[in-house]
Each structure stands twice: as structure tokens, then as C-alpha cells.
Image (spheres, rainbow, N blue to C red):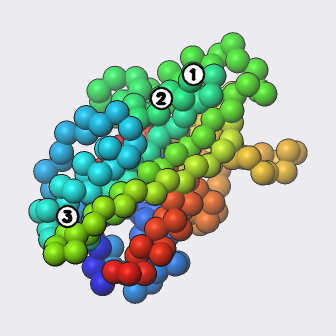
Amino acid sequence: RQIVLATHNAHKVQEFQAIVASSRPDLLVISYDGPEPVEDGVTFAENALIKARAAASHTGLPALADDSGICVDVLGGAPGVFSAYWAGHAKDAAANLNLLLDQLADIGDPQRTAQFVSTIALVVPGDASSEHVVEGVWPGRLALAAAGGGGFGYDPIFIPDGQDPAAERTVAEWSASEKNAASHRSRAFSELSPLLAAL
Ligand code: ITT
């Protein structure tokens, strides 16, 4: 069964392919990077639906889209839906991350709590068309400085909860398989299982 993944982010493609391969090896994920719709939603769910609807209508295939970001408690949930553009319009990951570190410069470790959020929309076109939205949340806190070379986006400054306090690492210091077993994206994807089973 083919399913289209609507994203222009190559890191998301890699992560979804690995997550799907380990849980639904029968699904063939095709990445779709056709015309980019305007993401003018104010929530992750609205933006995920905008992207998945565009891909489903262009291809006629079931389409998945992820809208995601980092939500920092002391900033009232920002950057949130603005994560990709936090430091401007260029989707500059290093600038985004440095701005966030600057904004938290005076905030001590216990107050640096944050969550990665992934909202996935599944749009199934055709006679029995349907739309579904699921969400995965990955709690943690922001590091005082960037560390690690793996992953993408805010991974070098995100320390997931649940690690040995003496050996905490940022996600950019985790292997790809460690990240994909625990991430907001894999948590959201697991919520989709019953819906994908029906495809
Ligand atoms: P598409 O819309 O084409 O899928 P995008 O990167 O613009 O690609 P979003 O609008 O959903 O996607 O923005 C998500 C941003 O949130 C992303 O650019 C990162 O800055 C951040 N982000 C999301 N998931 C992340 C992860 O797993 N690790 C690090 N940063 C992440």
C-alpha cells in the first residue's frame, strides 16, 4: 500500500521512513514535495491538514503530513507553530536555536522545561474520504548550550526527560534509531496505527 508523505523537510522523510519500516513495513512511503501550500493555520493541526489535503488531492493517494515544533513553557508555548521561522523567514536552524538560547539566557535549569510536539494529519481521498489528526508530545528541557551533531532543528538543545541524570544527552547526541524509538514523531505515528490498519 502506498502512502504519500507531504513534506519539504528531508529529515522528516528519513525519520518517517525509519518509523514506518519498523512498525508497518508493508506501507511504501513516497515523499511528495509538490507545490507547497501556504501554511497559514494557527495550530499544528490546521497546518498539518493543509499540507496533507494538498498532497492527497494532487496524488489521489492517502497522504500524511507532520506539523511540528518546540513549545517552551516559560515562553507560553512559543516558538510552537513558528518553530521553523523563529529567527526570521529563512528556516535557518542555527539562527532559530541561537535565538531561543538567548531568550532563555536568564532562565535556570528547572524552569527550562519544553516539549517537542508532532501533529500528523492523515487524509484519505476517494469515495470514503476521511481526515484524521493525531498528536505526539515528547517532554524535556532546553540545554544551556548546543551539543551534538545529529538530527536537525532544535535537537542540539533538547534534553528529553527520563535519562540518567549523570549522563544526559541532547537529542543531537542520540543515534537516529534512539530518537525514532522515543520521539514526538514516533509517538504521534503510533496513535495512527488503528487508522492505518484500515487502509
Ligand atoms: P514541512 O512543512 O515541509 O514538513 P518544515 O520543517 O517547515 O517542513 P514545520 O513547518 O512542521 O516543518 O516546522 C517544524 C520545525 O520544528 C522544524 O523546522 C524544526 O525547527 C522544529 N522541529 C520539528 N521536529 C523537530 C525534531 O524532531 N527535531 C528538531 N526540531 C524539530
| One can see residue 175 in this view | no
Q: Quadrant of the N terminus?
A: bottom left
Q: State the residue position of label 2.
A: 79
Element class at badge 1:
helix
Q: Position of residue 177 (x, y in %)?
A: 59, 66
Using the numbered discs, state the Cα–Cα distance from disc 1 to disc 3 in whole angstroms.
35 Å
Q: Quadrant of ligand 1?
A: top left
Q: State the residue position of label 3.
A: 56
Using the numbered discs, state the Cα–Cα distance from disc 3 to disc 2 in whole angstroms.
28 Å
Residue flagged by tag 3: what amino acid is it? Ala
Q: Residues within 10 Å of mark 2 (few under 14, many from 20)?
A: some
Mark 1 and mark 3 in contact? Answer it, CB < 8 Å: no
Out of 95 and 193, give the one closest to the viewer.
Answer: 193
Q: Residues within 10 Å of mark 1 (few under 14, many from 20)?
A: some
Q: State the residue position of label 1.
A: 75
In the displayed structure image, the side of residue 115 where residue 117 appears, left or right: left
Out of 177 and 116, give the one closest to the viewer.
Answer: 116
Out of 33 and 69, give the one closest to the viewer.
Answer: 69
Q: Is mark 2 within 8 Å of ligand 1?
A: yes
Using the numbered discs, state the Cα–Cα distance from disc 1 to disc 2 in whole angstroms.
8 Å
In the displayed structure image, the side of residue 187 where residue 69 appears, left or right: left
Residue at the front extreme, as displayed:
128
Residue flagged by tag 2: what amino acid is it? Pro
